[in-house]
Image (spheres, grey):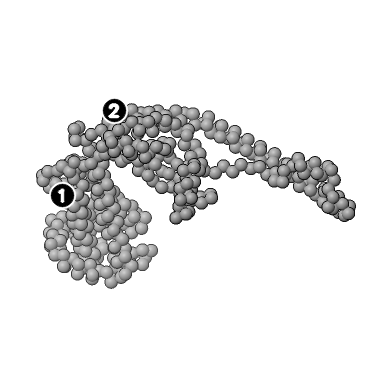
Amino acid sequence: MIGQSYKASGQYTAGNVAIFLAGGLGIGFLLGAAYIYLLGLISNMLLRSLVVVGYVFSISGSLIWLVRKTKIRNTRIVLLVTVLILFISYYSSWVFFVNLVQDSWQKGAKEVWAYHLQFPLLLERWWELFVSPVALFSAIVDILPYGSLSINGEILKGIPLLIVWIGEFLLLFFVPLYHVVYRAGRPYEEEKKRWLPTKEEWTVNYVESYREVRNGVRKQDLQPLFEALEDLSFYQLQGQESYAIIEFYRKGKYIGPYITITNVKAVQAGPRKLDHKAIVVVKMLDIGAEAAAELYARIKKEYEVYEKNKPRFEISSKQAWADKISSLSFNLLRRFGNITSEIKNSTRSKKHKYRRNRPSQAEKSNSEEMPASVEEITVHGPRVTPEMEREYLKRKNH
């Protein structure tokens, strides 16, 4: 509904949840086996790191794809099922790992791969250990003192190996979990029955009247928001430390009705120091598909105009820097002339010691014409607004 923020409907069916669970377990089983055997074949640490990253992205992407295909809009259900899938998949990979290590100790590294290519036998031995968690844990405890991972020719074992295993678990479990649940929270249009999986961000000028925008949104009045977004000139961002980020949710060329606006506010933290803090103005606000598409087209057009005229702007910037350099050179020459004059005056005072405290009329006129500090260099710092000054004083007093 226009004027309201997106909230997941929470709809799901038992059949879709069962498909998600079964598909996730099947994918986790295959990816876990591939992950363990690839690590067993590869000894290079860089390639092993790529295998780990590939596993994380593969299982995350697969589970996100399943969530969208099953159209589960209940994030709690997605969270619980994803936890179950990742835990069982990780447990399954440990079964493959223990079987591989034990067979390598008994049969040797040369025969183990031919032995493990016998899929029916491999599956049977995997199931025997899978349904015996006590035996699996006992085997892991037996492997820990001897080690199974070599780094630079040295076998990693004991406490260092245990730390590596814990880090591996945190990476392979929590990163995919966060990724899946975060993506499952993207908007879903119930009327058109489609996800808006892509989030596109644009940088625009700071929304000054964000409090009025929030108050208007609470009353389902979008007029303050549209007024705040009327002027979106990218040229206004030049030299500005505060800015805003507007996010659109889309599928292909279709722009959904939801937008998120976040102010990134520059706050003075000291005389020459700024901090940035994010202020969410609106989050996944429904402004209507037509208004969102029009706003997106306007921002994109403004950006294209800015990119087209950017070389011209850069030339003007270079000219500004040339003017600064010329001004600085002129000031330095004046300073050099002043220093030369001071040297001459000091030489004259040595010759006429009795006139040290009695400057001549020429020296008086020279001192009146030349200021005490002739170095007139403009310091171009960040744009500090009165609002930032008040914020800084408030923080300083507290």
Where is residue 305 drawn, in percent x and y?
Answer: 44, 28
Q: Which mark is residue 76?
A: none
Where is residue 170 drawn, in percent x and y?
Answer: 28, 58
Where is residue 43 drawn, in percent x and y?
Answer: 33, 59
Tell me if residue 79 can be seen.
Answer: yes
Nearer-N-terminus badge (2/1): 1
- Badge 2 element: helix
Tell me if residue 41 can be seen.
Answer: no
Give the residue displayed 45% in from the left and 48% down from the top.
Answer: 391
In the rendered structure, the answer to whether residue 380 lies left or right of residue 341 reads left
Above or below, comparing residue 7 to residue 34 in the picture? above
Viewport quadrant of the C terminus: bottom left
Q: Are marks 2 and 1 in contact (CB under 8 Å)?
A: no
Give the residue displayed 15% in from the left and 49% down from the top.
Answer: 21
In the rendered structure, the answer to whether residue 392 lies left or right of residue 192 reads right
Residue matched to label 1: 21
Residue matched to label 2: 290
Q: Residue furthest left?
A: 15
Identify the amino acid type marked 1: Leu
- Front-most of residues 67 and 95: 67
- Badge 1 element: helix
Viewport quadrant of the N terminus: top left
